[in-house]
Amino acid sequence: MTEMKLDKFCLVGAIAALLALIFPLAGIDADTGKQVAFVSDIPGLAIAMALCVIAGAAFTWLGVRSVISGVIILAVAVFGCWQAIATLYDHGVAGFAGTGFWLFILSLWAFVWRGIDVIANYRSLETAKQQIANVTVPVAFGFWLLFVWEVLVAGFGVPQVLLPPPSMIGVRFVTSTDIMAADFYQTFVKAVLSGYVLGCGSAFVMAIAVDRVPFLKRGLLPLGNMVSALPIIGVAPIMVMWFGFDWQSKAAVIVIMTFFPMLVNTVTGLNAAGKLERDLMATYASGYWSTLFRLRLPAAMPFVFNALKINSTLALIGAIVAEFFGTPIVGMGFRISTEVGRMNIDMVWAEIALAALAGTAFYGAVAYIERKATSWHPSFRVRRH
Amino acid sequence: MTLKQVVNNVAEMPASKNAVVDIKNLSLTFQTADGPVYALSDVDLTINEGDFVSFIGPSGCGKTTLLRVIADLEKATGGDISINGVSPEQARENRAYGYVFQAPALLPWRSIERNVTLPLEIMEISKEERIKRAHEALKLVELNGFEKKFPWQLSGGMQQRASIARALSFDADLLLMDEPFGALDEIVRDHLNEQLLKLWARTNKTVAFVTHSIPEAVYLSTKIVVMSPRPGRIIDVIETDFPRERNLDIRETPEFLEIAHRVREGLRAGHSNDE
Ligand SMILES: Nc1ncnc2c1ncn2[C@@H]1O[C@H](COP(=O)(O)OP(=O)(O)O)[C@@H](O)[C@H]1O
Ligand SMILES: [Mg+2]
């Protein structure tokens, strides 16, 4: 026999799906003493399991080589995921999931893993196709994680106070858009953006001054390290006393948090231009400001953007935590702290999701501007002859 | 101005009339952690207007340092130096020279064209004029068509040519070049040497040119300065009298070979001193 390589993931998927058909789908209801549900009563699930067995067996022999086979596998898995969710909620299996159900989830896991793997290794010279593949991988992976979360929480009947399923968080998210929009406006638009601009902007200007005056460099930078080590929980109440309950005190906390990363990075960046380039500017009798704008600031940009990216994350954390110490009755941090007290955990999670989205988008925007502004830097260069 | 200074100035006048660079008894000692490094000692040299002067010598003999002193990038620790009759600092502020470094030193965030216009921008020359001059300079080094490229998209030799275009763009009368062709292959080098000679013959610029290569020095120069290390000093100055318009064929003439021989002897003598 010539060498025959079996696709192990598909093999696991097929066997697990086959066993899922045999093992009990759900546990025993303590009140009635009967098994909650049977595969034979749920045609959609039975079809999905059968499909997994067939597709798994087929691809175990054929191997998953092309993107098309990866997409077919993923499609089978998506259909399976849909049927698994329906089984949980429409057939009363939620909280009673049995061995058969978990074997089916194991089977789906094997298919999703194999499918994403194939697409992740896809290489195309056509940028459009490559980009679709590049986006599909994280999106598919993200959805899979949400699905696992949903299935685990629902299948084991985890109390919602401990961990609500993502579907519940999603529903809460879309039904509370007005509250969330107000919180977002208060925390992100007012506090984060103003604090970020003020903190980064003033630190940038200060860095140029520090660079020019040697004693500031030696005196201020060590002091700066001390300030940046201050615990935010200590600073926030003081800022609330100084600047009041509204967004101004949160912006002040953000200014303190973002100031020194920006200062230190910019001062470092201003010294990034090489000696040769400085000599070059000297041969043109270029003045201080001319050299600053034509050589030293452009050379400092990678460092400046580094600080801008670090600070985009710090600013959001700072604003949310600072709101724990007094705030008008709106804001993401305020909402989290009060809804925890009222056991509305789904609302807390919805705010966490909002914070994650806002933080990612903010960071992404800064990173995008960085790519455009410092496209000359070796880490971004693309050869285009 | 004291009487003595006036008298001195008057006395120097005839000598410095045509002298672009006038160096007397110059020395430079670097203070390092391992003790003093005598980079230049007792250097006397006059470079006249229209001269093409080559500096040749083993590495570490102070060629770069001497060029940097002329450019006011390094301060002499002893002796006198004047450029166009004024101090190097004054000359630098007058933008009296264009300097070509050993490495291209192009700014990576600027296109080739904007690299070449950099000095013009600093000198506050109008935009149309800047672009016009950049195109002329790039044409001289045969880089026309590469204006919009970025430095990292060009080969090392092309980058060095761009840096020469940059030094030419503002049309200084004095060109200081520190092994500008050191990293290039021989064919490109011959070609650029020819271009440089043509430019020099046409414009009456004064050129100070550091090189490692004896044929290059003899071919290009009106004056060859042979240097020797530890301490860095001048051991021979050879004047040549080839016509200003010359071509690569002169490298086969007996005269050429004789001068090359004398340079080699000088280098050898400097070297044996060392042992
Ligand atoms: N900035 C500096 N500090 C200390 N020593 C230096 C410095 N620059 C050059 N030197 C020393 O001066 C000597 C002459 O150097 P350089 O002018 O670069 O020689 P060349 O260009 O002829 O190879 C060398 O010994 C070198 O190590
Ligand atoms: Mg050198």
Image (spheres, rainbow, N blue to C red):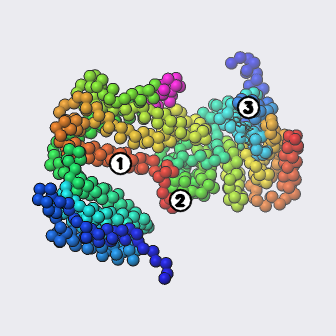
Percent coordinates x, y for residue B177 in the rendering: 68, 45
**Which of labels 1 and 2 is toward the front?**
1
> Which residue carries the number 2 mark?
B145
Q: Does the magenta stretch include residue A141?
A: no
Percent coordinates x, y for residue A345 in the rendering: 20, 43
> Which residue carries the number 1 mark?
A364
Q: Is residue A219 left or right of residue A248?
A: right
Question: Could you say whether the residue bearing mark 3 is in a helix, strand or loop?
Answer: loop
Q: Is residue B100 left or right of residue A146?
A: right
Residue most toward the top?
A: B2
Residue type, numbered disc 2: Gly
Percent coordinates x, y for residue A167 in the rendering: 20, 53
Question: Most prominent secondary structure in the magenta stretch?
Answer: helix
Up-down: is A210 above or below A382? above
**Residue A351 seen from this side:** yes
Q: Is residue A210 magenta?
A: yes
Q: Do labels 2 and 3 share a chain?
A: yes
Mark 2, ligand 2, within 8 Å: the answer is no
Q: How far apart are marks 3 and 1 (CA)?
A: 50 Å
Quadrant housing residue B235: top right
Q: Mark 3 lies on which chain?
A: B
* Residue at 26% in and 73% down: A50
Residue type, numbered disc 3: Asp
Residue type, numbered disc 1: Gly
Q: Circle 3: is it few (<14), some (14-19), or many (20+) Cα within 10 Å?
A: few
> Which residue carries the number 3 mark?
B34
Q: Is residue B241 left or right of residue A357?
A: right
Up-down: is B167 above or below A191? below
* Residue at 27% in and 39% down: A188
Q: Does the residue at mark 3 contact the one at mark 1 (Cβ under 8 Å)?
A: no
* Residue at 24% in and 47% down: A163
